[in-house]
Image (cartoon, rainbow, N blue to C red):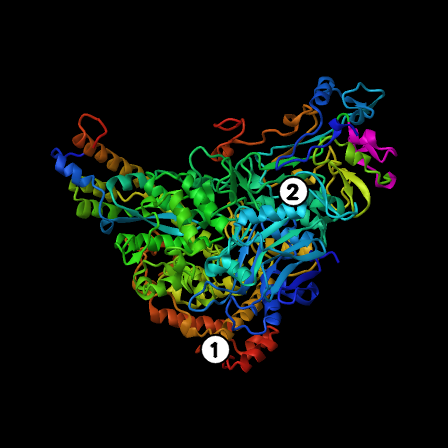
């Protein structure tokens, strides 16, 4: 949970928006067969869905069919701050990045931070939980 | 030949053509160390036997897991190479039949000899060429020097494709002998040794048992999958997703 | 003679309808596969400067002595060579390769290869049943897709498309019997209209896509080749072959099935069985399925029958787009997209580049209805099976943007006036020769260098597993690789004959321009030309440098390749001698390229490689990229993501490489001395006659 002042509906809508393609964050799907395939991410929800926590054992199991979805964490934090505009979320991501853990260990934390923030957007935009946001 | 003796052409999947009633009958008396061979049963269909003779059961049986099979046909290549010195799918005593476009698990069938307790192929042979080899664990095999090429054993096998083949290069019948006689492989074979198909199967989809399997498809097509097969959504009894 | 060879090569001239036999013995010194193919091409293609669609082009589909044998992960590959149609600016003499069972059946039918010359006056297919070869009318097949074509041919050859029972191949009971279907390699519907994009397809998912080999078939009015054999491959030492395969299992899954590999990383020979399970929708179960004799089973057959035997780029050209519009989840769209490609017979690598390019163009508002690139493709359905099918269909029917894509991707970009600028910015990811960016030339340089010194994206993962994947994956998950960078350099030195230099493993900013890297690339070109492309060891299992089961983690490469080759052939060829034959083949190929116009000045990467780092925000995102480096006297693994290439240093490296190869450093052309040392004096004569022999 963010430790900042409450989100306004306007902020939540802005942070939760689907951006113009020119504002994208590019991630990479690392796959042994194809090299790295760039993936365009244009919303916080996109990034949250793209990040897949997995451990090394999963990679062994899937072998050459393993895919690692990679977003450079610092770029992600910068993108959230500069493009999305959600400084509270960016601060939280920066704090995770600052721990300098291996990427695989950062992913669950990054994903959780994004998911929590998405839930907050939703709570503000759809307080009754009607699903009509 | 009576209508009910015809072997059905198999689709992508290999089909058993032996009549259900016969199999039920045989299963009912199965499990003994001595099998009863119904003389001429394939000709006579549902009729009760006119003559009965006894042969000792084989000391071993090949089991397969068709779901685990990768379709690489190494078993076929190993079989023909060990027995004949050349790699020849048409001379392999185990056949893997597959449909590249088929849906799993019906895209592959493995046709291995069942070493039947009641070997119709042995029974059908007029010269004793197709016989029970008592020196090599009672495997059902063929003495090529006695084979006159009538192919009755090929026809008698109740399964499709026939587990007894016409060796069109050497002009005699041949069948699986559990590698009792492999002139081109230095390993000791037979029930007390190694089998080339089983040894070289890279998926470990072929195994060997000394117990007479249940005389139906499930008796010979078993679950050899371990937990690592969970990843593919069809792990065996040892895996979390169960044997489906 | 029991030596693995069938003994004869099928030569079909479609112009004259002549069917002849070439004694394999004449080309046996080349080993098989690519070596034989190049030597035959050299002899039979009279004018090597013709375009790929010229009737004078010669296409070879070659096997090896190991084809159709139980040597591990080699028996199923078929090597295809011809003057290509995909390359840009020149459709170089090129190669592709496909798996499955075609090569095995060709051997069982009694042939070591098929060579096709000329052009038929109407659509035909070639029917091979053992010794009997006929040229059949393909008028009724020409518009069919690859699956329909195969089903028709199966029914024709076998009287039914069904399989399962023994079928006689003739009226005599001794004519041979088989339970198997004919192995058919075919092209898509009316492929003469999209030749540079057209692949060869065999069974459900085996394709030879790169180079436009399907286009070469189409240009000859050749729809398909079908083979069914009931003969055998005679083995020099059957017991040694059987024993060798069992021996190899200590390095592979079958020897450790009870406790499969747990080491983090990507390993070839030792990998656990896989279907392409990550590419199927949730709930789809799948069988790991392998080509003939494979220990590695890299693709699958599925419970839906969708995506059968497809693999690799067949899925990856579309999976990221599927996931992007489906909440990060794979749906059936990815497998259906693979099936669309396979059925139309379209090159998946080319289509991957198209999708990335179109995504970038869409972002800029440049493509769509009424846009600069006017297209009515259903872009609103991007990421669904509908869009994949529509895009493939547009190429196959030359409608909408497909009318231009049918010319080839680079050729299409040129027509649209976008080639130069989109290569410069990198939004059109074609790394060299008009081939799609695959592995990054800036970071994993042996891949890029090998590709510009050759004629296509090399697509050879030998070093890739150990210098990139394993250290990168381990870095991402905080795990130490099973071998240190220093140990890796020792293993590469041991395997990297004849140079055997640990500095071959140095991918540092200095190392990539060094003599050591010249040796790496030379070794790699020579090793693959013989052991991978001529004896046809599969790229997914070989080379095996690092192996979690091997002694001190050393892989099977070096010992394994000749062990199987010698058991089958009865020869006593060493690993190093094989590599030397590879050097000879590599020089012969280069001579063809030189006749086609190759000069060192042309051997450069697309501009983006020199101008843009592979960093987040680029179409060729390549972060992270962790590789072995030797810096300040110490070996370590280090990320080199974001690196650009320095033009002058690349040129300096080329000079080192040409010198190492014995080529003229100003032109990149082989010298007479080099060619004669390899027994290619006649090739030197031809180059001299063309005024293209390198100066001594």
Is residue C576 visible to the viewer in this orientation of the structure?
Answer: no
The percent position of residue C420, horizontal first and vertical second, equals: 32, 66
Label 1: how many Cα within 10 Å (few below 14, some 14–19, many 20+): many
Whether C77 is drawn above or below C669: the answer is: above
Closer to the camera in the image, A66 or C634: A66
Residue at image coords 82%, 42%: B172
Query: How many residues crowd mark 2 within 10 Å: few (<14), some (14–19), many (20+)?
Result: some
How far across and how far down the image is residue C617, in percent?
28, 53
Q: Is residue B66 left or right of residue B213?
A: left
Quarter holding the N terminus of chain C? bottom right
Where disc 1 sits, the SS reads loop
Q: Nearer the viewer, residue C160 or C408?
A: C160
- When asked about the image quadrant of residue C401, the answer is bottom left
Same subunit, labels 2 and 1: the answer reads yes
Residue range of the region highlighted in magenta in the rendering: B119-146
Disc 2 target residue: C160
What is the chain identity of the residue bearing mark 1?
Answer: C
Return the mark for residue C664.
1
């Amino acid at each position: 949970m963010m430790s900042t002042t409450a989100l306004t509906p306007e902020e939540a809508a802005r942070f939760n928006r689907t951006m113009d393609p020119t504002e994208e964050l590019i991630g990479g799907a690392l796959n042994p067969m194809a090299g790295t395939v760039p993936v365009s991410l244009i919303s916080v929800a996109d990034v949250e869905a793209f990040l897949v926590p997995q451990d090394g054992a999963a990679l062994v199991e899937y072998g050459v069919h393993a895919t690692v979805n990679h977003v450079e964490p610092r770029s992600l934090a910068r993108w959230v701050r500069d493009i999305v505009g959600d400084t509270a979320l960016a601060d939280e991501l920066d704090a995770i990045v600052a721990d300098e853990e291996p990427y695989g260990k950062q992913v669950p934390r990054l994903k959780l931070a994004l998911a929590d923030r998405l839930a907050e957007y939703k709570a503000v935009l759809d307080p009754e939980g009607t699903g009509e946001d | 030949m009576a209508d009910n003796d015809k072997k059905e052409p198999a689709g992508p999947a290999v089909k058993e053509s032996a009549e259900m009633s016969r199999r039920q009958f045989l299963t009912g008396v199965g499990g003994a160390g001595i099998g009863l061979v119904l003389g001429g049963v394939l000709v006579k269909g549902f009729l009760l036997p006119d003559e009965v003779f006894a042969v000792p059961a084989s000391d071993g049986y090949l089991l397969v897991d068709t779901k685990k099979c990768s379709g690489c046909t190494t078993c076929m290549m190993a079989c023909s190479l060990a027995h004949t010195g050349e790699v020849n799918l048409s001379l392999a005593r185990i056949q893997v039949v597959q449909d590249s476009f088929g849906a799993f698990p019906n895209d592959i069938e493995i046709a291995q000899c069942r070493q039947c307790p009641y070997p119709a192929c042995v029974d059908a042979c007029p010269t004793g060429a197709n016989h029970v080899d008592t020196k090599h664990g009672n495997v059902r095999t063929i003495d090529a020097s006695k084979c006159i090429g009538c192919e009755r054993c090929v026809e008698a096998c109740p399964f499709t494709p026939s587990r007894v083949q016409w060796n069109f290069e050497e002009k005699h019948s041949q069948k699986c002998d559990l590698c009792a006689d492999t002139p081109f492989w230095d390993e000791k074979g037979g029930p007390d040794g190694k089998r080339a198909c089983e040894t070289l199967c890279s998926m470990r989809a072929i195994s060997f048992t000394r117990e007479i399997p249940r005389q139906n498809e499930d008796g010979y097509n078993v679950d050899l999958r371990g937990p690592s097969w969970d990843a593919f959504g069809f792990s065996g009894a040892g895996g979390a997703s169960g044997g489906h | 003679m029991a030596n693995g060879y069938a003994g004869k090569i099928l030569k079909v001239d479609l112009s004259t309808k002549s069917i002849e036999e070439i004694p394999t013995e004449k080309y046996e010194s080349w080993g098989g596969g690519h070596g034989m193919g190049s030597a035959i091409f050299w002899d039979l293609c009279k004018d090597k400067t013709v375009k790929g669609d010229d009737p004078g082009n010669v296409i070879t589909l070659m096997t090896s002595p190991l084809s159709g044998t139980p040597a591990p992960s080699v028996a199923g590959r078929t090597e295809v060579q011809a003057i290509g149609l995909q390359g840009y600016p020149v459709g170089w003499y090129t190669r592709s390769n496909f798996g499955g069972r075609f090569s095995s059946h060709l051997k069982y039918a009694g042939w070591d290869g098929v060579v096709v010359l000329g052009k038929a006056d109407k659509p035909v297919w070639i029917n091979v049943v053992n010794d009997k070869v006929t040229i059949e009318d393909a008028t009724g097949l020409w518009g069919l897709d690859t699956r329909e074509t195969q089903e028709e041919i199966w029914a024709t050859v076998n009287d039914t498309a069904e399989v399962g029972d023994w079928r006689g191949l003739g009226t005599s009971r001794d004519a041979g019997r088989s339970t198997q279907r004919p192995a058919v390699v075919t092209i898509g519907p009316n492929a003469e209209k999209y030749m540079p994009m057209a692949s060869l397809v065999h069974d459900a998912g085996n394709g030879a896509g790169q180079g436009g080999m399907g286009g070469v078939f189409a240009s000859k009015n050749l729809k398909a080749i079908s083979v069914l054999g009931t003969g055998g491959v005679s083995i020099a030492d059957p017991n040694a072959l059987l024993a060798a395969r069992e021996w190899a299992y200590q390095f592979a899954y079958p020897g450790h099935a009870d406790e499969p590999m747990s080491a983090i990383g990507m390993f070839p020979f030792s990998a656990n069985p896989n279907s392409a399970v990550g590419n199927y929708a949730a709930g789809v179960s799948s069988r790991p399925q392998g080509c003939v004799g494979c220990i590695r089973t890299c693709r699958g057959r599925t419970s839906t029958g969708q995506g059968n035997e497809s693999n690799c780029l067949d899925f990856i050209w579309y999976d990221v787009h599927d996931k992007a519009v489906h909440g990060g989840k794979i749906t059936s769209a990815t497998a259906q997209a693979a099936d669309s490609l396979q059925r139309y017979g379209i090159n998946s690598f080319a289509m991957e580049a198209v999708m990335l390019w179109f995504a970038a163009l869409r972002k800029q508002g440049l493509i769509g209805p009424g846009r600069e690139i006017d297209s009515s493709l259903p872009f609103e359905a991007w990421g669904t099976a509908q869009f994949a099918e529509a895009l493939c269909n547009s190429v196959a029917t030359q409608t909408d943007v497909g009318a231009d894509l049918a010319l080839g991707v680079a050729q299409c970009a040129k027509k649209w006036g976008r080639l130069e600028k989109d290569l410069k910015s990198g939004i059109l990811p074609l790394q060299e020769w008009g081939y799609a960016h695959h592995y990054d030339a800036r970071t994993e340089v042996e891949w890029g260098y090998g590709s510009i010194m050759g004629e296509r994206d090399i697509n050879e993962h030998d070093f890739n597993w150990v210098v990139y994947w394993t250290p990168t994956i381990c870095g991402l998950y905080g795990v130490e690789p099973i071998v240190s960078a220093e140990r890796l350099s020792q293993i590469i030195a041991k395997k990297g004959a004849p140079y055997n230099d640990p500095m071959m493993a140095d991918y540092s900013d200095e190392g990539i321009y060094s003599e050591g890297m010249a040796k790496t690339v030379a070794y790699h070109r020579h090793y693959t030309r013989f052991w991978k492309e001529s004896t046809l060891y599969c790229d997914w299992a070989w080379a095996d440098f690092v192996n979690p089961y091997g002694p001190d983690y050393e892989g099977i490469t070096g010992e394994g390749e000749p062990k199987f080759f010698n058991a089958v052939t009865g020869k006593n060829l060493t690993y190093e001698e094989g590599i030397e034959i590879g050097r000879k083949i590599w020089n012969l190929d280069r001579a063809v390229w030189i006749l086609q116009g190759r000069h060192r000045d042309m051997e450069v990467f697309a501009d983006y490689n020199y101008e843009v780092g592979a960093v987040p925000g680029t179409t060729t995102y390549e972060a992270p990229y962790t590789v072995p480096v030797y810096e300040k006297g110490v070996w370590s693994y280090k990320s080199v993501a974001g690196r650009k290439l320095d033009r002058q240093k690349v040129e300096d490296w080329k000079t080192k490489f040409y010198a190492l190869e014995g080529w003229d450093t100003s032109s990149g052309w082989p010298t007479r001395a080099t060619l004669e040392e390899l027994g290619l004096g006649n090739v030197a004569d031809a180059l001299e006659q063309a005024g293209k022999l390198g100066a001594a």
